[in-house]
Image (tube, helix red, strand yellow):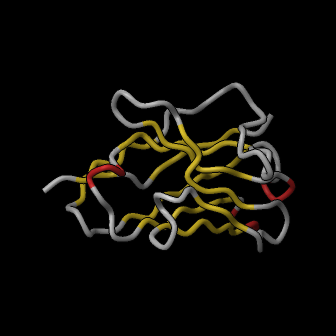
Amino acid sequence: QVQLVESGGGLVQPGGSLRLSCAASGSPLSKWPVGWYRQGPGMQRELVAAITQGGGGVTKYAESVKGRFTISRDNAKNTVYLQMNNLKPEDTAVYYCNLADYMSGVSVRSSWGQGTQVTVSS
């Protein structure tokens, strides 16, 4: 069973940047599409970005983050990244990664990790 651990969150001012990492162990991550999700205070968990399996050349994003976030993968390191630029207070949330169905964006697993907290505040 693949295990996923998120890291890289923190406190940043509006307009700042963070790079989140999703490190996998137990199974190659390259054979799975991966999604980044977030859950803000009082909000439902939502998909913010997804990347296809293999080379990871195809990506998609929620409208709220297009042009600001970039998802990528390094299969040699068994890691998926989320580069977040021009962060806004509404980006404040716990961010999670998970194996995903690329077309629907829905996680293919019911289990979630601890996530990593991103707080955007002045």
Q: Quadrant of the C terminus?
A: bottom left
For the point 57% across and 33% down, which residue is it?
113
Residue 80 placement, left or right of 11: right
Residue 39 placement, left or right of 47: left
Could you tell me residue 44's position as x and y percent? 49, 30
- Outermost left residue: 122
Residue 65 placement, left or right of 47: left
Q: Quadrant of the N terminus?
A: top right
Image-quadrant location for residue 30? bottom right
For the point 34% across and 68% down, which residue is it?
17
Could you tell me residue 45's position as x and y percent? 52, 34
- Outermost front residue: 63
For the point 61% across and 30% down, which residue is it?
112
For the point 69% across and 69% down, which residue is it?
74
Residue 110 placement, left or right of 10: right
Could you tell me residue 92's position as x and y percent? 33, 46
Q: Identify whether 90 is placed above or below 3.
A: below
Q: How many numbered discs? A: 0
Q: Identify whether 40 is placed above or below 64.
A: above
